[in-house]
Each structure stands twice: as C-alpha cells, then as structure tokens.
Image (cartoon, grey):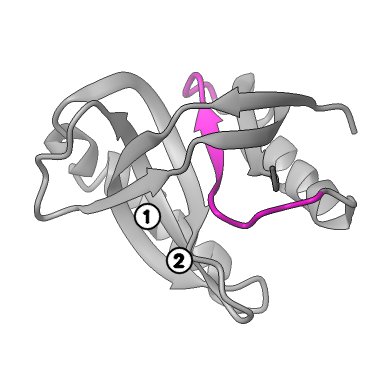
Amino acid sequence: MNYEIVNLNEKTIVGVSTTTSNDDPKMGEKIGKLWMDLYQGGVNAKIKNKVNEYAIGLYSDYTEKDYVVTVGNEVSKSENSALTTKIIPAGKYAKFSLRGHMQKVVAETWGEIWQMDLDRSFTGDFEEYLNSDVENSEINIYIALKE
C-alpha cells in the first residue's frame, strides 16, 4: 500500500467523542453514532471557527485496551465548551490518499494499516474527508509516526 511521509503542524479538532477498541463488538455502532450526531444531530452547525469543511475522524488517547474516537472539524480556536476539543500533535505522519466508496475504502485501508510495519507513535491518527460524496469520496488517512 502506497503512502507518503509528511510533516504536519498541530491541529485543534472540535467535535464529539467516545471510547472504544478494536475488540469492542459495538465499535462500529459507536463510531457510526458519532458521525450521525455530527451531521444529523446538529453538532456540525455548532462548531465555531472552522478552518475548512473537511470532516475529521481522530483516533487518540491510545491505551493497551482502547482509544478515543473524536468526529468533528479542525478549528482555528476552540470556543465550544459543550463539545470535545482534541489536539493532533505536530509531527511526522504516513499519509494514505484514498478514493472510492467511503466506508469500503476506509475499512480496507485500516485493515491494511494494522498489518503494516509502520513505526507508529499512537499520538493521534486521523481521517480527513475532503468531500461528502459516499460513492466517490476523497479521503486522506494520517498515521502518526515516531520521529
């Protein structure tokens, strides 16, 4: 699977969060609910100071058992006390550029990423949705790497 190494500046994300794990039988349901809350639940409209309209799915706060998933947008300044604020640290990332059916290409790519021998830092991996076309989506997945 092809990827490029990029260096990113710190990003502030505001949205909604939940804790889950790859072994959690309700993982898909929990993450799906976050996306529903973002778009159908009105969270997206409440996020102030958006840098752009790209939706972000952030995986952070990794432990041996679980991690936090935050779905939202990058902001220039966090002013949403009722929502979750997370920081994507500056650093080196493996960037995977995807095109195709949204759920299919994301699921397939994550399956491959988990099998790869990347020198991951587990500080904050994220999906950046460049459009909302489910059938012909453009998505970048960024995996945090050790420096």
In the image, taking residue 113 as reference, residue 67 lies left or right, namely: left
Name the residue type under label 1.
Leu
Q: Quadrant of residue 39?
A: top left
In the image, taking residue 74 as reference, residue 41 lies left or right, namely: left
Decide: few, some or many residues near mark 2? Use Cα within 10 Å; few <14, some 14-19, many ≥20: some
Nearer the observer, 51 or 120: 120
State the extent of the magenta-drawn residues as a range: 119-133
Name the residue type under label 2.
Lys
Q: In which quarter of the image is residue 25?
A: bottom right
Nearer the observer, 27 or 68: 68
Decide: few, some or many residues near mark 1? Use Cα within 10 Å; few <14, some 14-19, many ≥20: many
The residue depicted at 81 percent of the width and 27 percent of the height is: 3
Q: Quadrant of residue 7?
A: top right
The residue depicted at 70 percent of the width and 29 percent of the height is: 95
Identify the element where label 2 is drawn.
helix
Q: Where does the C terminus fall, quadrant-wise?
A: top right
In whole angstroms, how far apart are the C-alphas of marks 1 and 2?
Answer: 7 Å
Query: Residue 54, relative to residue 22: is it above or below?
Result: above
The residue depicted at 62 percent of the width and 57 percent of the height is: 122
Q: Position of residue 72 (x, y in %)?
A: 34, 41
In the image, taking residue 84 as reference, residue 120 lies left or right, namely: right
Q: Name the residue under label 1.
A: 34
Residues under numbered marks 1 and 2 in contact, where contact means CB atoms less than 8 Å apart: yes
